Image (cartoon, rainbow, N blue to C red):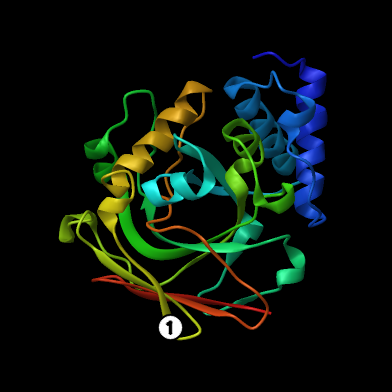
Amino acid sequence: MTLAPSIIASLAEYLENAELNARDVPMITIEHPTLDLGDAYAIQDEIWRRKTARGTRIVGFKAGLTSRAKMKQMGVDQPSRGFLADYFAIPDGGEVAVSTMIHPRVEPEIAFVTKHALRGPGCNIANVLAATDFVLPAIEVIDSRYQNFKFDMNSVIADNSSSCRFVLGGRPRSVSELDLRTLGMVFEKNGLPLAYGAGAAVYGHPAAAVAMVVNLLGERGHEVPAGSIIMSGGATEAFAVAPGDAVNLRVQDLGSVSIRFT
C-alpha cells in the first residue's frame, strides 16, 4: 500500500457518494497515480465498512472481469472481486430506474448460494462445489462511477468492481445435477438476442471464479458466510441499457430471469 489511511478513507467516501448520488467522477488514479492493488482493496473495504456502519447488510460477493470478452472490453488483464449490498437486489421481473444510475450495463451470470462458509487462501473448485447449496441464473447490472465508463484495474477495484444491482431468477438447481462448464445461455434485450454464452466462458469454470473471489477475500482476512450469494461473473461482454429496455436471460437447465429499465 502507498496511500495514508486518511486518503483511503477520503477516497472511499468520494466513490461511495458518487454511487449513492449517481454522479460520475474522474478516475482516482489520475490524482493518485501511485495507488496500488492493496490501496484499491483497502478503499473497497472501507466502502463496505461505511455501508455496514449505516445498517446496510452485505448479502454476498461478485467476481468481476472473469471472461476474456469482459477483460478485452474493459482493457484489463486480471479478474477482481466486489461485494453485494442488500439494496442492490431487484426481484425477478422487477423494474429499476435508470435515473438512479450513471451509465448502467447488463451481463449474464450464474449465481451461487452457499450452504457452508468458504475461506481462503487455497479455496478451489471442489471446495466451492461442496459448499454450494444451489445455483441460479442471474443478471448483474454494473455501473462504473467513472466518467465515460473508463478505468484502470486499481480504480475499478476501489469502486467495488462497478457493483450496482442484481436479479436472481429461474429455478434453484444442485451443482451435482449440472455440468456448469457446458451450460448454454441466451441473453436478450427487447426480445432480440444480444449474445450467446456458456459457463466455461467464466474463468474456465464458474466455480473457479467463485474460488478466486474467496481467495481474494481471504487475503484481507474476510470469509464468505453460509447463505451468501456469489455472482460468478459475466459470460459475455456487458451491454448498455436505457429506459424502456427489457432484458432476459435464459440458461440451459436453470430457466430464465428478467429485469426492466424505466
Name the quadrant of the N terminus.
top right
Is 195 or 87 nearer to us in this picture?
A: 195
Work out whether 186 lies above or below 48: below
Residue 22, x across and y down, in percent:
78, 57
Mark 1, residue position? 192
Work out whether 41 lies above or below 185: above
Work out whether 141 lies above or below 253: above
Q: Is residue 243 left or right of residue 203?
A: right
Q: Residue at x 31, y 53 (%)?
A: 133
Is 137 or 197 nearer to us in this picture?
A: 197
Q: What kind of element bears circle 1?
A: strand
Q: Residue at x 36, y 42 (%)?
A: 209
Q: Is residue 67 visible?
A: no
Q: In which quarter of the view is residue 260 placed?
A: bottom right
Residue 57, x across and y down, in percent:
64, 49
* Numbered circles on residues, count: 1
Q: Which amino acid type corresponds to the residue marked 1 in the rendered image?
A: Leu
Structural crowding at the residue carrying mark 1, measured as other residues with C-alpha within 10 Å and reported as few (<14), some (14–19) or many (≥20): few
Toward the bottom, the furthest residue is 191
Q: Is residue 210 left or right of residue 149?
A: left
Name the quadrant of the C terminus.
bottom right
Q: Is residue 36 left or right of residue 24?
A: left
Q: In which quarter of the view is residue 16 placed?
A: top right
Residue 67, x across and y down, in percent:
38, 48
Residue 37, x across and y down, in percent:
58, 23
Q: Is residue 155 visible?
A: yes
Q: Residue at x 53, y 46 (%)?
A: 74
Q: Is residue 94 left or right of residue 230?
A: right
